[in-house]
Image (cartoon, grey):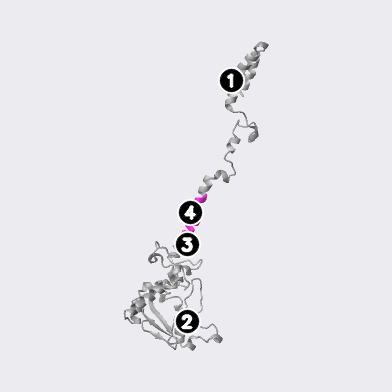
Amino acid sequence: MWYGSATTPIELFGPTRYQWDQGYFQQEIYRRVSAGLAENLSFSEAWSKIPEKLAFYDYIGNNPAKGGLFRAGSMDNGDGIAVGWLGHPVLRDKEGRELFVRRMPTFFETFPVVLVDEDGIVRANVPFRRAESKYSVEQVGVTVEFYGGELNGVSYSDPATVQKYARRAQLGEIFELDRATLKSDGVFRSSPRGWFTFGHATFALLFFFGHIWHGARTLFRDVFAGIDPDLDVQVEFGTFQKVGDPTTKRQAVLYSILVGYFHPLFFYLMNKKRDLDLNHHLFFDSLFFIW
């Protein structure tokens, strides 16, 4: 399910982390926009046809891997309740080149704001230090214009505003989020897909393997107790002269019965000529038979 199986629809569980890693929804959005432009739609009209749900899937807050360990609660407790799509920001430098914000990878909490052109060449950024402000938004003269959504057709050239939307564009499509209602703290939580995976992993490790463990304990309890399966034969009464010593095995029971039964007759025939006291022998032979 974590890998995006077809049996776990994103309508129910939300997108997978791999759809963010591969830019799956971003590519689909660009494909639809390109198709709209091919139909002679304007840039604004093409972006306005993008469904809000599709744009919302292309937002890092829906990435289940963004919810860190020990962050309990729903997604709305993190970045807030999504109110509406502000639109797609298109950034350009003073030479008119379209710039693309490099998106934040899955396992980053912070990421530098880097703007590249269509060839992947860095054209602007938000510098960490003034000494490295060669590509700053102010120097390059970056502007932002929105297409589609609530800010359709609105443009900004103020560097502070441009930097704000460039930072937000790192996280995918830009949405207005209500944090006041649920007192959301701004820290991402995992989606139902992440909790579903966590819950089933817990059940698998504890309950499923617990059943396997206790079943094995029952089936192989003699092995766990250190008892050999043949041990009951060794300690059976009368099998060995010395209990538990297989080197002192007695004769077979049938042989003992036959000897005990025919032994008096054999003594009688062999010793009749000697006038031995048969009663004397029968007495001891009877004791032998009883033994």
Is there a contact, CB below 8 Å, between mark 3 and mark 2?
A: no
Q: Residues within 10 Å of mark 4 (few under 14, many from 20)?
A: few
User: Does residue 173 show up magenta in the picture?
Assistant: no
Which is more N-terminal, label 4 or label 2? Answer: 2
What is the secondary structure assignment of the residue under circle 4?
Answer: helix
Which is more N-terminal, label 2 or label 1? Answer: 2
What is the secondary structure assignment of the residue under circle 1?
Answer: helix
Q: Which mark is residue 198?
A: 3
User: How far apart in space, not on screen, are marks 4 and 1 (Cα)?
Assistant: 62 Å
User: How far apart in space, not on screen, are marks 3 and 4 (Cα)?
Assistant: 14 Å
Q: Could you say where residue 145 lies in the image, as x and y percent from the top left?
A: 40, 84
- Residue at horizontal 38 percent and vertical 79 percent from the top: 87
User: Does residue 209 show up magenta in the picture?
Assistant: yes
Which is more N-terminal, label 1 or label 4? Answer: 4
Q: Residues within 10 Å of mark 1 (few under 14, many from 20)?
A: some
Q: Nearer the viewer, mark 2 or mark 4?
A: 2
Question: Is residue 255 something that shows in the picture?
Answer: yes
Residue named by callout 1: 261
The magenta stretch is 195-213
Residue named by callout 2: 115
Q: Amino acid at mark 2?
A: Leu
What is the secondary structure assignment of the residue under circle 2?
Answer: strand
Q: Which residue occupies the foreground of this view, 268 or 75?
A: 268
Q: Quadrant of the C terminus?
A: top right
- Residue at horizontal 63 percent and vertical 19 percent from the top: 285
Q: Nearer the viewer, mark 3 or mark 1?
A: 1
User: How far apart in space, not on screen, are marks 3 and 2 (Cα)?
Assistant: 36 Å
Q: Could you say where residue 251 lies in the image, as x and y percent from the top left?
A: 61, 28
Residue named by callout 4: 208
Apparent side of residue 7 relative to residue 67 in the rendered image (left or right): left
Examine the rendered structure and indicate whether residue 128 appears above or below residue 70. below
Is there a contact, CB below 8 Å, between mark 3 and mark 4?
A: no
